[in-house]
């Protein structure tokens, strides 16, 4: 399997409303997180990738198959775990998972054998003969994962897999997802609002907002710490000290604030030869001017996925960590 | 001096146990290579749908009701055949025997038509109760998201549900009617009945299939639209009880205009059954396209409703 997903000038419009647009995105096998606020286009992208929604323009390939033209093949090789409960009422957990296998083309006896294995793998041995709709959330979530794994898929799409789980259940589910990749070699596409979950299990991420791919790349590259770079909070007029900072070779980048508020947080990058003393010197000098500018906070610039996401979505700039 | 307690790690012991098989639950066997033909993806949908209805107590009640009707006719055919054999050659009793035979079961097209029409009442009640289990719950519990995320097309889902519902109806109409046909033929002096009654056999199969498929399509449309049992029962009652009464009243008030009867699904089925069995009827004799068109409109509307509701389902939402 060379490429997991490839999007080429993919676009989906609903009337005049742009639901999704991407020029060129290539994702390699691994655990990929799909991030974005509500209405970012995650569902539209997943529907197009599974061949359930025709693109308005462009093409998408999943596991080497054209998603629009070979939808059936795509769905045969992909396991999808939906966000909301979606069960066949009246079936036991085992019957439900077996049915998933049969729908993927397996014979009834094979599907049942495989369902037993998958349920054991997910620790559902005791719940297998109970009615699925009567099970607690944790078991229902695992049953949904089991039906996604029944056809031994190359790629498992997980839509908010930790929805409704308590902290222990959430942790167990994330561990399960990690093991699926590590020990079963499955690629995973994880769509979630919970950035902590994504950061914990994903190798790479795609960040979407308002139908556009704003960034994609390795999590480690997106969140890497920046040497000689600091996040500062500034009170007062920054124009005066901004000029002074630039004169001393310090780069200043504002972190956009939400809802049009003036920025208070900045990323400063010092020259290689300098340290934080230079920064204090500049602000001490600026503090004596009429347009006083006070340094009220200083931290090493180490971003986690949450701050990267906030910065990228607030900035709305496109790009990718891998170029 | 007390000895240190011995620590036993069961994981270390397991592989050394005699004949023990240590199962690593993280090792899955590969998924089977031999798969069912993609065109047969509807079969699990049909099997599961049928299974869900069959295991319900209400199904057994209605099957029992249908069976009572069948057993009554079957027993009468047996009883009259036995009586005829005993009275053979005797002048005494032939008159009352002929009267009873013509009154209870004549072996003509009308007999089989009336048997299926009688069973239709049980079918109507069974379908009204089963509609939510067969189709409605799939919408309510978002099963369609599950179905359509698999390599299953919408027409295959529809076909699976249609097969499940039609099989239920067939169990109550076509199959017992065929059994009566065979029984009646076997109790004759010769097998000529089977040869002479090919039109009747055609009528049984055609009418049985029309009832099975027609009522199933209607149910799929109604159940997809309404989803809950109580709503389905109400609309079902409207179609099969209220509309026939209203159209009959209007029919009488309009001095015998048949056009209002086109709204009555029962009346349309009755007309089709007459046509299949070759029974002469005044109803729409000059304009056969009217009932055919009306039946097509009923079924078309049900198909449209079903299609619209399933198309609106978003797998990823």
Image: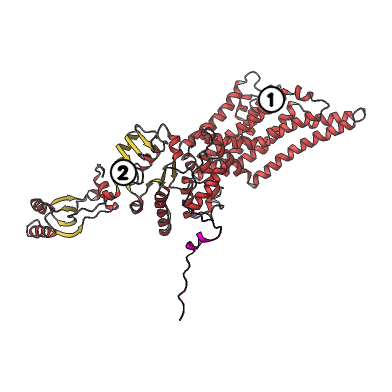
Quadrant position of residue B283: top right
Closest to the observer, B195 or B165: B195
The residues bearing labels 2 and 1 have C-alpha atoms spaced at a distance of 62 Å
Element on which disc 1 rests: helix
The quadrant the N terminus of chain A occupies is: top left
Q: Confirm whether circles 2 and 1 share one chain.
A: no
Task: Name the outermost residue toward the top.
Answer: B286
Asked whether A230 falls inside the magenta stretch, the response is no
Element on which disc 2 rests: strand
Badges 2 and 1: C-beta atoms under 8 Å apart? no
Query: From the viewer's perspective, is residue A212 above or below residue B24?
Result: above
- Is residue A104 visible in the rendered image? The answer is yes
- The chain containing the residue under callout 2 comes to A
Q: Which residue is mark 2?
A: A208
- Residue B159: percent from left, percent from top: 55, 34
- Is residue B131 visible in the rendered image? The answer is no
Q: Which residue is mark 1?
A: B202
- The chain containing the residue under callout 1 comes to B
Is residue B174 found left or right of A73 in the rendered image? right
- Residue A53: percent from left, percent from top: 40, 35
Magenta stretch mostly in which secondary structure? Answer: loop
Query: Which residues, given as a range, are shown in magenta?
Result: B1-26
Is residue B255 found left or right of A48 in the rendered image? right
The quadrant the C terminus of chain A occupies is: top left
């Amino acid at each position: 399997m060379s490429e997991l997903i490839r999007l080429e000038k993919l676009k989906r419009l609903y009337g005049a409303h742009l639901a999704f647009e991407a020029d060129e995105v290539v994702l390699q096998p691994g655990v990929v997180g799909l991030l974005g606020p509500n209405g970012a286009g995650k569902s539209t992208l997943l529907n197009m990738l599974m061949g359930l929604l025709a693109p308005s323009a462009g093409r998408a390939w999943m596991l080497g198959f054209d998603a629009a033209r070979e939808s059936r093949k795509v769905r045969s090789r992909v396991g999808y775990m939906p966000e909301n409960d979606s069960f066949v009422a009246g079936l036991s957990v085992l019957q439900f998972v077996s049915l998933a296998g049969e729908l993927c083309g397996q014979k009834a006896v094979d599907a049942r054998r495989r369902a037993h294995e998958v349920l054991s793998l997910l620790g559902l041995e005791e719940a297998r003969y109970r009615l699925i709709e009567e099970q607690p959330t944790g078991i229902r979530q695992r049953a949904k994962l089991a039906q996604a794994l029944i056809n031994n898929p190359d790629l498992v799409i997980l839509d908010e897999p930790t929805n409704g789980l308590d902290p222990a259940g959430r942790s167990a589910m994330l561990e399960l997802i990690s093991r699926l990749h590590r020990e079963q070699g499955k690629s995973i596409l994880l769509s979630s609002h919970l950035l902590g979950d994504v950061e914990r299990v994903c190798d790479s991420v795609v960040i979407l907002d308002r139908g556009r791919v704003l960034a994609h790349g390795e999590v480690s590259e997106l969140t890497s710490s920046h040497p000689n770079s600091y996040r500062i909070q500034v009170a007062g007029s920054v124009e005066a000290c901004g000029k002074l900072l630039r004169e001393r070779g310090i780069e200043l980048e504002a972190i956009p604030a939400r809802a049009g508020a003036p920025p208070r947080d900045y990323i400063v990058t010092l020259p290689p030869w300098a340290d934080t003393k230079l920064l204090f010197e500049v602000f001490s000098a600026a503090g004596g001017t009429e347009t006083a500018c006070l340094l009220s906070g200083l931290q090493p610039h180490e971003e986690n996925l949450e701050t990267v996401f906030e910065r990228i979505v607030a900035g709305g700039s496109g790009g990718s960590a891998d170029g | 001096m007390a000895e240190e307690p011995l620590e036993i790690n069961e994981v270390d012991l397991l592989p050394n146990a005699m004949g023990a098989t240590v199962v690593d639950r993280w090792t899955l066997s590969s998924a089977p290579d031999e798969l069912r033909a993609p065109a047969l993806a509807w079969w699990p949908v049909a099997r599961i749908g049928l299974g869900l209805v069959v295991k319900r107590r209400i199904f057994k009640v209605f099957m029992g009701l249908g069976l009572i009707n069948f057993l009554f006719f079957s027993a009468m055919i047996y009883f009259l055949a036995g009586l005829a054999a005993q009275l053979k050659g005797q002048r005494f009793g032939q008159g009352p025997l002929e009267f009873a035979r013509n009154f209870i079961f004549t072996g003509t097209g009308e007999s089989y038509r009336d048997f299926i029409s009688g069973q239709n009442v049980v079918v109507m009640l069974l379908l009204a109760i089963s509609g939510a289990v067969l189709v409605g719950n799939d919408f309510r519990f978002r099963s369609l998201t599950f179905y359509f995320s698999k390599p299953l097309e919408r027409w295959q889902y529809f076909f699976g549900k249609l097969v499940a519902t039609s099989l239920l109806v067939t169990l109550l109409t076509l199959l017992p009617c065929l059994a009566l046909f065979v029984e009646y033929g076997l109790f004759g002096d010769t097998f000529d009945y089977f040869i002479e009654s090919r039109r009747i056999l055609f009528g049984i199969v055609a009418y049985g299939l029309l009832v099975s498929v027609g009522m199933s399509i209607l149910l799929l449309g109604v159940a997809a639209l309404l989803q809950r049992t109580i709503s389905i029962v109400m609309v079902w009652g409207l179609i099969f009880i209220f509309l026939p009464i209203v159209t009959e009243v209007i029919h009488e008030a309009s001095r015998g205009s048949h056009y209002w009867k086109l709204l009555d699904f029962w009346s349309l089925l009755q007309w089709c059954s007459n046509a299949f069995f070759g029974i002469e009827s005044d109803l729409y004799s000059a304009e056969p396209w009217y009932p055919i068109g009306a039946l097509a409109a009923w079924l078309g509307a049900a198909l449209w409703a079903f299609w619209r509701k399933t198309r609106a389902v978003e797998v990823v939402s």
